[in-house]
Amino acid sequence: MKRIFPVFLFSVLSFVGLAQTEDGEIDTRNLMKLNLSDWYFARYELAYEHVLNGSTSFQLAFAGIAAEEDFRRYSYNNFTGMEAWNDVEINHGGWRFSPEIRRYAWVYGGMPEGIFVSIQGRFEQWNLELDEDIDDFSGIPEGQFQQELDGNFSQFHWGGGVMVGYQWYSDNGISLEVYTGPMFRSYSRKWSHQGPLTDNEQESAEDAIEERVFPNSRWSQYLQSDSGPGWRFGLTVGLGL
């Protein structure tokens, strides 16, 4: 990641430098936008788009992650080797940062409007505070897991992609845009128990998350995603500044 981010930043700056050398002056304007499509994924994102010239803009988007969920499920207990009830509470938190450079078919009156193609980067940290209670400890060796299975799970990913979209801008200063495109994402994950664990206990605790906690979470598919290609889409509404 340390090598990839400077390369991406250098590419963006070079792209911006070339764009600023084009002939013609415009009344540079800005947009503040709210992402409507990511609310389902517990992300609340604001973006600031700044027009550079007659066809180019640069955008910075920052999202906060916040959600709570709890569930109770009768399922196989990989600790005891039998069916048991599991009570799970999860607090979600984190952030996402997305820089983006865009090229429009035209910029009307200083505002970005119409068809655009963009290069976008993404860096995200998603943290989960887990409180897992198991009702039946009869199959667990004496002295192991005799307290609540409280722990912290963190998921970080970086990535980038190419987006194609269309942005409308009305006379009253309201914007609306849709975009979609392929992305590549690389994930790294870490889980830690709030207390000392042996190697075997650590492995079992990690299995508990993958086998019992994640499949019941509202965002289970995303929490178990593999590194590699993916697809991005979005819908935003904004206001000209």
Image (tube, rainbow, N blue to C red):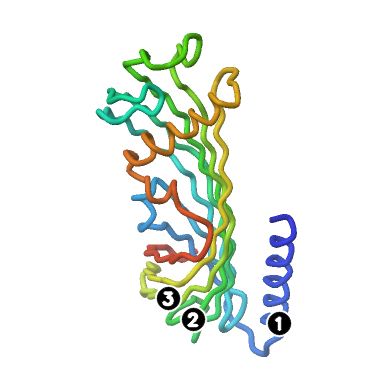
Tell me the residue that label 1 is attached to. Answer: 18
Q: Amino acid at mark 3?
A: Gly
The relative height of residue 104 versus residue 222 in the rendered view (above or below) is: below
Callout 2: 10 Å neighbours few (<14), some, many (20+)? few
Secondary structure beneath label 3: strand
Q: Which mark is residue 109?
A: 2
Q: Horizontally, is 235 left or right of 200 in the view? A: left
Q: CA distance from mark 1 to mark 3?
A: 22 Å
Q: Report if the CB atoms under discs 1 and 2 are less than 8 Å apart.
A: no
Identify which residue is drawn at 45% across, 13% down: 147
The relative height of residue 79 versus residue 221 in the rendered view (above or below) is: above
The relative height of residue 31 versus residue 109 in the rendered view (above or below) is: above
Callout 3: 10 Å neighbours few (<14), some, many (20+)? some
What x and y, as percent, mark residue 64? 49, 45
Q: Horizontally, is 71 left or right of 62 in the view? A: left
What x and y, as percent, mark residue 6? 74, 62
In front: label 2 or label 3:
3
Q: Nearer the viewer, residue 54 or 27?
A: 54
Secondary structure beneath label 2: loop
Q: Which mark is residue 53?
A: none
Q: Report if the CB atoms under discs 2 and 3 are less than 8 Å apart.
A: no
Q: CA distance from mark 2 to mark 3?
A: 19 Å
The relative height of residue 169 versus residue 196 in the rendered view (above or below) is: below
